[in-house]
Amino acid sequence: MRLVRLSSARCTWPGARALTIGGFDGLHLGHQQLIRCARAAAQRLGVPAAVLSFEPLPREFLQCERAPARLTNFRERWRVLQSLALDEFLVMQFNAGTAQMSAEAFMQLLAQVGARHVTVGHDFRFGHRGAGDAALLAASGAQLGYAVEVVAPVVLDGLRVGSRMVREALASGDLAGARRMLCRAYTMRGRVRRGAQLGRTLGFPTANLAMHRRAAPFSGIFAVRVHSPAAALNGWPGVASLGTRPQVNGVEPLLEVHLFQFSGDLYGREIEVEFVARLRDEQRFESIEALTAQMHRDAEAARALLC
């Protein structure tokens, strides 16, 4: 899958393509339906199938600290899209120029990137202050050289699947519900970096991953499995802490993973952490000894679930 970076100043790309547009945070069942429709259109037309998305996500730019927690950072979104049989990932920088773009200018932009078929969700909005909607796009697309397909929402158990529903499931510890909406386990990924080594001194060496997002969609202590082809890991069991580490007055969200009976070197390796079950909330303990005792209990609970 080819990665193409665009901006409001550089918004043309040669060739023709069938594309679908959106934030695609989480790439849940609704997003997957849009991608299936774009792939089918691409096959009919004999052109590449592409996703057009944004970085940062529009709500992150417009709402800053009030934006919802991201389900997938850029690296995670890229990796999931690679698994969905797409040809191109067009990423448009969302900045002040993008935010001020009129609905008419955005529709022209789609022609500039070679759109021949555009797939959007029924609630798709675009342009400055969301002035454009799916109906306007469908009515105007033919004049600009592309057909428009508006896709109905995907419903699961009587509810519309959306990123907000996935966030709510994760926040409540319903990992099974999140898995059904994503059609895969919820994971986070990143490169292992050096930390403060506190876990090692307590007998629990950890692989530390930065979140690369303002806020995580949930926090706590989890039973996990770790995947990394580069490190020959395929579902390696472990226990993880996700959050700000109240014991050390942390501020930045961090994912710390202890892999059971693992002695390899993971520094600099990209790993994917699969969340299997939530064990408890983060908490602050009265002493390091109390923290260590709880870490042993967490490890035992995770082993019982995983091993």
Image (spheres, rainbow, N blue to C red):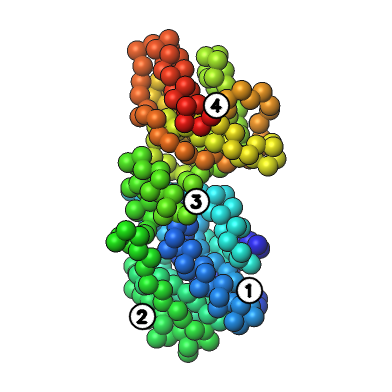
User: Which residue is denoted by mark 2 in the rendering?
Assistant: 135
Residue neighbourhood size for the residue with mark 3, other residues' Cα within 10 Å, grouped as few (<14), some (14–19), many (≥20)? few
Q: CA distance from mark 2 to mark 3?
A: 32 Å
User: Which residue is denoted by mark 1 in the rendering?
Assistant: 48
Circle nearer the N terminus (4, 1): 1
Secondary structure beneath disc 3? loop
Residue 16 in view (yes/no): no
- Camera-near label (1 vs 2) is 1
Report the disc number at residue 258.
4
Report the disc number at residue 166.
none
Frontmost residue, 81 versus 128? 81
Three-letter residue code for mark 3: Arg
- Camera-near label (3 vs 4) is 3
Residue 140 horizontal/vertical position (percent): 42, 85
Q: CA distance from mark 4 to mark 2?
A: 50 Å
- Tags 1 and 3 in contact by the CB under 8 Å rule? no
Residue located at (44% from left, 49% from top): 179
- Tags 4 and 2 in contact by the CB under 8 Å rule? no
Residue neighbourhood size for the residue with mark 2, other residues' Cα within 10 Å, grouped as few (<14), some (14–19), many (≥20)? some
Circle nearer the N terminus (3, 4): 3
Compared with 144, 171 (above or below) is above
Residue 148 horizontal/vertical position (percent): 46, 81
Residue neighbourhood size for the residue with mark 4, other residues' Cα within 10 Å, grouped as few (<14), some (14–19), many (≥20)? many
